[in-house]
Amino acid sequence: MKFLVILLALAVNHYWTRDRDILNDTWFVRFQGWLAERTRELPEQLTQHTLLYPALVLLLPTLLLGLVLWLVDGVAFGLVTLLVHIGVLLALFDRVNVNALTARYLELWRAENYEAAFLLLRERWHQVSLDNCDDRAMLHEEFCRFLMSSYFERLFAVVFWYLLLGPAGALFYHLAFLYRSRIWQHADSAEGDLVMRLVYVLEWIPARLLALTFSLAGDFVSAFTRLREIVLDMDRGAISVVHTCALAALGSSERVVLVRDAVTDDEEADPVTTVLIDAETAVDDHTLGVRAARQVEELLALLNRSQIIWVSVLALLALYGIGG
């Protein structure tokens, strides 16, 4: 059933062209506020434990979902259970239509309206580290990271944990991800450090599986070589891993993002060769704009090909009765 659920959820997610504001994450903020008030009423011996509040935040919704699945099990020949599974995945997927957002961003970028492009990105991604759009290369890099983050955290990792542990596992990861997003600026606290470590563990395997998929969907030699170099790097976060390997799959290194044609002086060599240059050394804004827009399109195409690969893998597993 899991393959059918994922296939239907991905299809609805793909063809649902409007932003799903009804499925936003504001409920989590309200839930945290309500839970914080309830925990303050508990005995002081309990509230002193660092693990108590994070455990309640992550486990209460997960257990509630498990109870709902238990209650509807077998109802209407399993149709209700199927609908609950699909509804959970759709609720956990990104509420922003990434394809439409990318098209709008590229429209602004090509029009050289960089300020509007920056504001669009900042509105959708709270982790933007830029204060303005003056650094075009950094703005481009931030948007590429946004694409990687959206695809990995709000799609691939959710599907991964759904396959392993069902809707409850997918929800648990999503709650941990939301929790981290809320406290990422206070990661030095005991609570923040605990949540950051938990999400790091939950994302470790999915990030490397996705990076491996990029090698199959793009330049295999470059991407797989880069993955081998960083696969055991414990200092890298999940987004850093998938972003680095995605660029390698496109034929670029981690910092080199542009490609231009150049004429060489070597008579034995091809007079026109492809040269990788760093974004910061681009000749002008127009050159940067054209090449960066092309790379965003290539990244989006890479993500779509990777999704097709995983759907094909899941179809084969379902065909042989593996994975449930």
Image: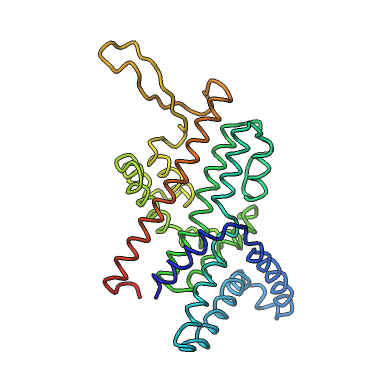
Q: Residue at x 55, y 52 (%)?
A: 98
Q: Is residue 194 visible?
A: no
Q: x, y (%) of residue 194?
A: 55, 62
Q: Image height check: is 20 above or below 58?
A: above
Q: x, y (%) of residue 286?
A: 57, 25
Q: Quadrant of the N terminus?
A: bottom left
Quadrant in the picture for residue 16: bottom right
Q: Image height check: is 188 above or below 267?
A: below
- Between 169 and 214, the one nearer to me in the picture: 214
In the picture provided, is 55 more to the left or to the right than 320?
A: right
Q: Residue at x 66, y 72 (%)?
A: 48
Q: x, y (%) of residue 96?
A: 60, 56
Quadrant in the picture for residue 77: bottom left
Q: Residue at x 57, y 57 (%)?
A: 17
- Between 138 and 84, the one nearer to me in the picture: 84
Q: Quadrant of the C terminus?
A: bottom left
Q: x, y (%) of residue 5?
A: 44, 71
Q: Image height check: is 317 above or below 182?
A: below
Q: Residue at x 46, y 48 (%)?
A: 236
- Between 202 and 96, the one nearer to me in the picture: 96
- Between 192 and 18, the one nearer to me in the picture: 18
In the picture provided, is 230 more to the left or to the right than 72?
A: left
In the picture provided, is 267 more to the left or to the right than 209?
A: left
